[in-house]
Image (cartoon, rainbow, N blue to C red):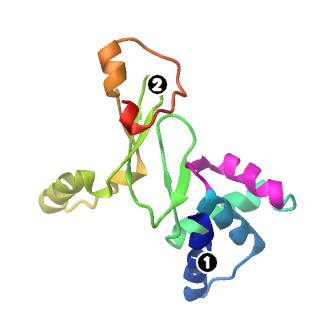
Amino acid sequence: MGKERLPELLDALRRRGERLTTARHALLSVMAHADEHLSADQLSVEVARTNPAIHRATIYRTLETLRRLGIVEHTHLGHGPAVYHLADDVHQHLVCEECGWVVEAPADLFAGVEETLERDFGFDMRANHFAIVGRCRRCAEEGTERVAGDRRTPTQA
């Protein structure tokens, strides 16, 4: 999937008249091939594997530029650092506050709430910026706290 996606991402930058810097190319390559959302620090480590000359500060600046251009989005999955994903893969995140399980839910999950907020308050909600935190089915059924980091698939809940 990543190999096909990278040329599309680079073309999107070109169409906007943006430069294809080494840092932009390296960062988008890592993100296109990633199996999960990564923090800026994690992205910096991954970029450094193939491009050690790209400084961590450049990664942070590049992420902000790509976010401003609408190529990259970031999400807060709880108390940790923001994680990044490509903007063409919009979705909502549900996070179990006990075990850390993360579910990527459909982007339209809160469409009704968004419509109500717009209609009643003139407010344009960005639901995908923050995760919805709660308890997964397994934690609720067990009724006990478990160690964070248990990354189950949605079918295991």
Query: In the displayed structure, would residue 12 be above or below residue 64?
Result: below
The residue lying at 35 percent from left, 28 percent from top is 136
* Picture quarter with the N terminus: bottom right
Task: Kindly identify the amino acid type of the residue bearing the numbered disc 1.
Answer: Pro
Q: Is residue 51 left or right of residue 74?
A: right
Residue that badge 2 annotates: 99
The residue lying at 51 percent from left, 27 percent from top is 150
The residue lying at 17 percent from left, 57 percent from top is 121
Instruction: Give x and y (percent) for residue 137.
Output: 31, 26
Q: Is residue 115 left or right of residue 60?
A: left
Task: Give neighbour class at mark 1: few <14, some 14-19, many 20+ (Cα, 10 Å).
Answer: some
Instruction: Give x and y (percent) for residue 153.
Output: 44, 37
- Is any part of residue 135 visible from this angle? yes
Whether residue 46 appears in magenta in the rendering, the answer is: yes
* Picture quarter with the C terminus: top left
Instruction: Give x and y (percent) for residue 100.
Output: 48, 30
Distance from the alpha carbon under mark 2 to that under mark 1 = 37 Å
Q: Is residue 38 left or right of residue 103?
A: right
- Is any part of residue 55 visible from this angle? no
Task: Kindly identify the amino acid type of the residue bearing the numbered disc 2.
Answer: Cys
Q: Is residue 112 left or right of residue 148?
A: left
Residue that badge 1 annotates: 7
- Circle 2 SS class: loop
Of mark 2 and mark 1, the one earlier in the sequence is: 1
Check the image and name the residue furthest to the right: 53
The numbered disc on residue 106 is none
Whether residue 19 appears in magenta in the rendering, the answer is: no
Q: Which residues are magenta?
A: 34-50
